[in-house]
Image (cartoon, helix red, strand yellow):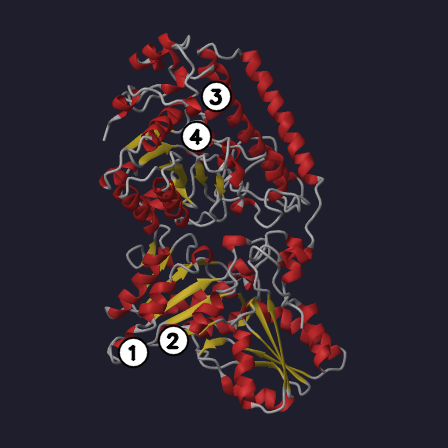
Amino acid sequence: MEIGSEIANRPRRGGEDDGRTGLSRRGFLRVAGLAGVAAGLAGHVARADGQIGYFAMDLPDDRLAGMLRTILRIRWHERTMADRMLSDPSYRAYNHFYAGQEAVATGVCAALRNDGPFEQIDLVYSTHRPTGHALAKGVDMAKMQAEMDFRATGLNGGYAAEMHISDPSVGFIGADGMIGPGHVIATGSAFAFRARGSDQVSVVFGGDGTYATPHFHSALNNARLLDLPFIYVLENNLYHQYAHYSYSCPHTDIADAARAYGIPARVVDGQDVFQVYNAAKEAVDRARAGGGPTFIEAKTYRYYNHLGAPGAEVGKLGAFGYDPLAITSFRPEREVRAWMQRDPVDIARATLIDWGVLTAEAADAMEAEVRAEVDAAFAWAAGQPLCNPEDGLKHVFAEGEVMPRQVA
Amino acid sequence: MTEKTWMYSVLEAVQWEMRNDPAMTWIFELTPPVATNAGMPVINLETEFGRRRVVNTGIDENWMASAVPGAGLAGSKAATYIPYQGAGMPYQVIQNHAGKLRSMSGGRASMPVVFVIEMTGQTPGFAGQHSDYEVDTIYAHIAGVRTVVPSTPYDAKGMMHAALRSPDPVVFLYPAGLRMLSEEVSDAPYEVPLTKAAVRQEGSDLTIVGSGAGMPEVLEAAATLTGEGMSVEVIDLRVLKEMDTETLVTSVAKTRRLLAVDQSYYTLGPAAEVVARCAENVEGARFRRIAFSDAPPPASPEMFTWMRPDATRIADAARRMV
């Protein structure tokens, strides 16, 4: 199902690529890109699929730089969170860290419609590892952090916390604390889009562990049967919870399974945001044009263990220590360090400097701005009020509240 | 005899049964069947019995829960450990297959199988989809499946032996909030019946009935009330299906007052069944129940802890009745 070149030649439809007129000044780069500009970036960029259109090169500078900024915002939110968890006993929030995978959320969401009326924006369904997806889709960092810290003024009023955050206003339908159900539900949104003639797209992020669930197969089968505007982004970070994915999936490329359902599928380098964007752009174009679902498998890696920061140290990226919960199979330190050599921050930054979009100084300045923004978000969140206990009886139904039953 | 934790006690029973039945299997995901205990050898079912009999699956509770009755129908003893995130996923196959096959086969189908269902989601911090305040109720409701919820390491080991030896499918609820509990537990195998509630404390003024993860709070409240001079009888249900009506009715016939406590949702929770059975059989007694409200547990510890029927609330409710 390699139809990338066909899609690449399709006229642009406007929208999130905003159809800027004229070939960008990087037009020559695009040509070079198809010829394999990767050679000039040896060691930084690995091209997975030569037939794919290199859409990212046509983007204006501000959107390209915006992708690096998003990656940095996710990264520094993660690192700040890890440091707080490790160093501050009074800090109550917890996290399933996304660090290492930033390019996937960023590249996919950069190809989506994230602003505008709810009836027009694309929807994202996330996982129990949601912070990267949330920030990439446009969720407010400070409010998200307040939610993760169980504050009354948090994104969801303190009812959700990390594995359950959501913000429909930017199309972030939300984290799904479970593995599987969200994928099928996401096809339901795609079904609604098709039924009402909308060009919206429904995207679900899932991990390699989802392959084993019945929901994975139901979602793909029904998306294909109904040609739904549905994109399955499978972030293969090699481990589901504490087990290597070979415990639950016989395929090396899980994309092979999607092809068996008749769904076009691509395997991309999940550490390279521009490769991810290119695949997502192709998928979004296909879905908006009525061409049905797409499956993207992004090969990636998480720098921390499944939950929290065991094995990590304050001020240092990544977790290398033995995780006491990883009894059956745990990640060799050598594997973690090897993946960190292909860091999504480094790759995006080096590519943009190579393309002349940013200077090293400008990239440094951007990172400093991001760190200040993250610090401010954490400070704001920490100053927010705690929840009123009695409010636990609210939001069960649209109106009213339920009876307290813990008292006679 | 050694002081043992809840999970060590349970796995000791499983290990004994697997050593004595080379056909028996164990299926898990996420939570390896491994337990350690001071002064005792490490139990690791996966390394001891090998991956042919002890399987680490993908995230597929539907398969886990279905494979176990399948093994049972083929004549093998089998058990699975469903972690809390998936406590509802096995419901269909337990409700519609495991619970019905003996009856719909006219007694010909038999399934000596155990579904260990973990209830980590009743501990603070496990909100939203990671909470489980309905699991005991829904499994207690269905017919044809013995549903038990031991609250001590001693009971857990004895009920696991009994469950694995039972020809009926057993849902073995694991209130994971009790994982740090330990007590003296015999090294030798023994059975605790799958049909009996336990009277934890005898008294004459009031009967308090609790179960599973709620028992430490009930016992703490009872200790407070006893210190105040109240004579409290405490019953630990242990068995939700089939519930031990006799022990309940005998107690309430004596005390004339029943306070039933649930850690699950109020509507149709085990406490509702306790009150109904006693009301049907004891004339003129007073009844009260407290439970978690019919609201999904919020993440905020401030909201969540306020909503729990804890020892203070249990004692308050008791004082209003006596």
Q: Give the CA distance from mark 1 to mark 3.
A: 64 Å
Tell me which corner region of the image, top left, top right, bottom left or bottom right, holds residue B93.
bottom left
Q: Is residue A349 above or below residue B40?
A: above
Judging from the image, mark 2 belongs to the subunit labelled: B
Q: Is residue A109 above or below residue A157?
A: above
Q: Give the CA distance from mark 1 to mark 4.
A: 54 Å
Q: Give the CA distance from mark 3 to mark 2.
A: 59 Å
Q: Are marks 1 and 3 in contact (CB under 8 Å)?
A: no
Q: Position of residue B137 (x, y in %)?
A: 48, 69
Q: Closer to the camera, B199 or B97?
A: B97
Tell me which corner region of the image, top left, top right, bottom left or bottom right, holds residue A84.
top right
Question: Image check: B253 left or right of A238?
Answer: right
Q: Are marks 1 and 4 on the same chain?
A: no
Q: Position of residue B24 (x, y in %)?
A: 31, 66
Q: Position of residue B75 (x, y in %)?
A: 25, 71
Q: Is residue A248 visible?
A: no
Mark 3 or 2: the one toward you? 2
Which disc number belongs to residue A112?
Answer: 4
Q: Write down the residue under mark 3.
A: A346
Q: Earlier in the sequence, mark 4 or mark 3?
A: 4
Which disc number belongs to residue B58?
Answer: none
At 48% from the left edge and 34% from the top edge, which residue is drawn?
A303
What amino acid type should be assigned to the residue bearing mark 2?
A: Ala
Q: Are marks 1 and 2 in contact (CB under 8 Å)?
A: yes
Judging from the image, mark 4 belongs to the subunit labelled: A
Q: Write down the residue under mark 1.
A: B103
Which disc number belongs to residue B143?
Answer: 2
Question: Image check: B157 left or right of B73?
Answer: right
